[in-house]
Image: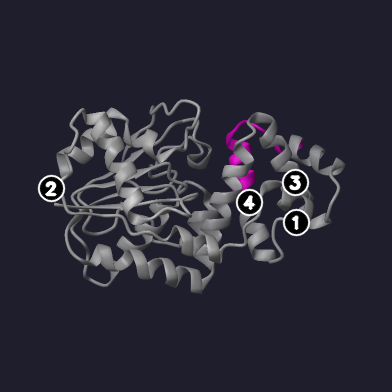
Amino acid sequence: MRLVLVHGINQEGKSEQIIKEEWLGALEQALGRPGRFDRASVRAPFYGDDLARLTDGGTLGQAIAQGVAEDDEERAFITAGLQQMALDAGLTDDQISTQQTVEQGFPHDRRFIAIVRLLEGLSPFHGEIALRVLKQAYTYLKQPHATAAVDAIVEPVLREGPCVVVAHSLGTVVTFKLLRKLAAETSPVHVPLFLTIGSPLAIVAVQTALKKPRAVPGGVARWFNGLDPNDFVTLGRALTAETFAAGIDNRTDIDNGDDPHASQRYLKDSAVSAAVDAAV
């Protein structure tokens, strides 16, 4: 069975070969079986450089100083996503509104800045990771040229035939959208296992941009989702009928230590690695 690995954010400067080496190495280490996937047909469609080039980047500090986005729709998307993350992390609307009154900067950016300040108080990494995920998610989902560029890299690999799909972070959004598209075209890909880790699919702004239907795509025999409850990108939420779609198996107690969104740490989880091992 073919194995398709679809990466997420922060992978620019790498390559398909590097992703394969990192991810397969993590899986084999977890299984205690060096060389387990040496004879497997493995692809890792790499779009990291293309998406980074097409995304209006910048650091968190630059976003605070210069504005989160010039485009009103992008600003609304990012602010809505950050607000949901903040509320799920235990902050309140009152805290956000109070912080907003003391912030400087462009009036339309003050709520964004207020949320980021509060998130940074919880963890210095929360705001930076959240901003990168939401910016790249917006670019992929809402900018047609970016959607086309990424899909042109990933979709042909999926169309090659039956495969196990392992996706991380933004890669879970890309693969869900493409598997749904192929199923709607009455040409679903047979996927014995669709394994998602560190997924932002529970974020309402992402769901709204994806539109409906939200369901396990046709052709997918099993969807297994893994998350570290401290992974800010996942909101700490399982993917269920209430948060995304019914019929998804979830492992919600993964412990990635001090880097909860890291792909390789997810792949070293015993249940995650065992699921891939059994399916390939």
Give percent across and percent down for residue 21.
30, 45
Q: In what element is the residue under mark 4?
A: helix
Q: In what element is the residue under mark 1?
A: loop
Looking at the rendered structure, the kind of residue marked 2 is Arg
Mark 1 sits on what residue? 67
The answer to whether residue 195 is seen in the rendering is: yes
The segment highlighted magenta reads 81-94
Mark 4 sits on what residue? 80
Give yes or no for residue 233 being in the magenta stretch. Answer: no
Mark 3 sits on what residue? 113
Mark 2 sits on what residue? 39
Disc 3 from disc 1: Cα separation: 9 Å
Which residue is found at the position 53% from the left and 37% from the top? 232
Disc 3 from disc 2: Cα separation: 50 Å
Mark sitting earlier along the chain (3/1): 1
Local packing at callout 1 (Cα closer than 10 Å; few below 14, some 14-19, many 20+) is some
